[in-house]
Image (tube, grey):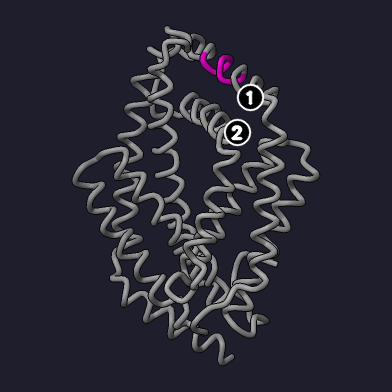
Amino acid sequence: MPYAFTSSDDTVQQGLRRITRTQLTSALNGLDHADDLHLAIHDARKVCKKLRGLIRLVRPVFPDYAKENAALRDAARLVSGFRDSTAMIETYDRLDASPHHDHDRDVATALREELEARRAAEEEDETVQDKLKAFRKALSDIRDRAEKWKLGKDGFAAFDDGLTDNLRRARKAMRTARKTRTVEDFHIWRKFVKYHWYHATLLHNVWPKKFEAHIEAAKDLGDLLGQHHDLSNFHILLQDPDMPGAARHALYPPARDEMQRLEKEALDLGALLLAEKPKALSKRWQAWWALWRKA
């Protein structure tokens, strides 16, 4: 079943347990039958993020929030190295294919070859299987505990404070990022935008046609900020003297310019997505929820 509350969920608590169970089961099955281990790990880590978004939506009425949020965060960190190496290759590919910049692509290719070699070396690391085993166990343990998760409220009251608090933080983080233009502040903003995307997705079934445009905009903004974050890490990589020197020098200017382009695009889109005040948005969504549940 989808990552969303459905009309068949008798209570929010029941939906919370169902979504968590199905998401983690899918992640574990993917890891156990992976044709592409990097992709399976990436998908499983995305499940951890989605579930952190889910429990953040009900955070004020979920007594076990701190414990389970930490468990999901720590589980994902066990295999973060696998994603980091792939993210750098994907960032290189996006930069190489971008029509916004021009650089010596023949020279830059040496960097991608080095990134591929580093990722291959990681796969041969003797600790890989130990980390994967610990990751699987952590996800399985969370799934088992989720069957007993309890919430203090039901209905939209379970969402209201979590939804509005995250939106307030997203708007504040956007204002800060616009003012400071630092990598750290854009990364903080990204986290709250991603959570809002998850929250809108979870409520998609309330009124699909109304929610779809909002979800798409939130996803686009999260993607822009995610690419910005990857480029900031790529910038650090380009300062590594063990990387091919000519390739580093060829890619540094376009990477810098691409970050600036993404910042402007993200701030423009963020101003639209986050224009409405949190309480007003929550009140509107609550009215839709009430009609949906009544129907």
Query: Residue at coordinates 69% horizontally, 52% vertically from top-left?
Result: 27
Three-letter code, disc 2: Phe
**Quick check: marks 1 and 2 in contact, CB under 8 Å?**
yes
Q: Identify which amino acid the numbered label 1 is placed on.
A: Glu
Disc 2 secondary structure class: helix
**Where residue 279 appears, x then y in whole percent?**
31, 76
Height in image: 149 above or below 221? below
Question: Which residue is labeled 1 in the image?
Answer: 122
Q: State the predominant SS element of the stretch in magenta.
A: helix
| Residue extending furthest toward the left | 179
Q: Position of residue 276 (x, y in %)?
A: 30, 69
The residue nearer to you, when weighing 272 against 124, is 124
Q: Is residue 106 magenta?
A: no
Which residue ends up furthest to the bottom in the rendered image?
A: 294
Say which element carries label 1. Answer: helix
Q: At x 26% / y 47%, what residue is drawn?
A: 177
User: Magenta region: which residues?
Assistant: 111-116
Which residue is the site of mark 2? Answer: 82
